[in-house]
Amino acid sequence: MADLRAINVLMRKRAELGAQVTELDRQTEEVVSQIAHVDACLALIGFDGDPNDIAPIHPQHGRVFARGQLQRLVLAVLREAEGPMTYRQIATGIVDQLNWDREDRDAMASLIIRVRHTMKRLRRRGLIPARGQ
């Protein structure tokens, strides 16, 4: 006998993935159009080479903050605090300072983890007191 709950969950997951594919296809078409416009501009200003020979630049993923920026932000939030703060509260303070979207759950979850690691480093270096002190 088929597990109807499992089937429904998998059907929903497939529908979500299909929607992602549709969105990525739309984004791809948009980027291809932008590349065509840049290629046309290059030709207008006298570029003689083949634009396809221009190697793509791959952005660094995961590099949201400049070197030391997150540590400075954490310390700034802690300086303004009136008492002990949770990692989530510190992350929310950083999001507010940077005018980021508080509702982006994935970004908040990632930031909370980064804040926790930053706090551990700050404690090890003696820049902030250990928990409970």
Image (spheres, helix red, strand yellow):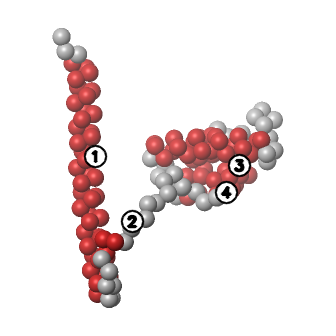
Q: In the image, 105: left or right of 88? A: left
Q: Marks 4 and 1, how far apart in space?
A: 35 Å
Q: Residue furthest left?
A: 1
Whole-angstrom CA distance, mark 3 to mark 1, is: 39 Å
Crowd band around label 1 with a 10 angstrom C-alpha radius: few (<14), some (14–19), many (20+): few
- Of labels 3 and 2, the one closer to you: 2
- Sequence-first tag of 3 and 1: 1
- The answer to whether marks 1 and 2 mark residues whose Cβ atoms lie closer than 8 Å is no
Number of the front mark, 4 or 3: 4
How busy is the neighbourhood of tag 4: few (under 14 within 10 Å), some, or many (20 plus)? few
Q: Quadrant of the C terminus?
A: top right
Helix, strand or loop at label 2? It is loop
Give the residue pinned by disc 3.
Answer: 78
Kindly report which numbered mark, 1 or 2, lies closer to the viewer in this rendering.
2
Which one is nearer the viewer's eye here, 29 or 16?
Answer: 29
N-term-proximal mark, 4 vs 1: 1
**Disc 2 packing (10 Å; few <14; some 14–19; many ≥20):** few
Q: Secondary structure at mark 3?
A: helix
| Residue 72 shows in this picture | yes
Of mark 1 and mark 2, the one earlier in the sequence is 1
Mark 1 → mark 2, Cα distance in angstroms: 24 Å
Label 1: which residue?
Answer: 20
Q: Amino acid at mark 4?
A: Gly
Q: Residue at point 32% right, 89% down?
A: 46
**Number of numbered tags placed on the structure image:** 4
Q: Amino acid at mark 1?
A: Gln
Indicate the secondary structure of the residue bearing disc 4: loop
Q: Position of residue 109 (x, y in %)?
A: 51, 41
Cα separation between marks 3 and 2: 41 Å
Quadrant hosting residue 34: bottom left
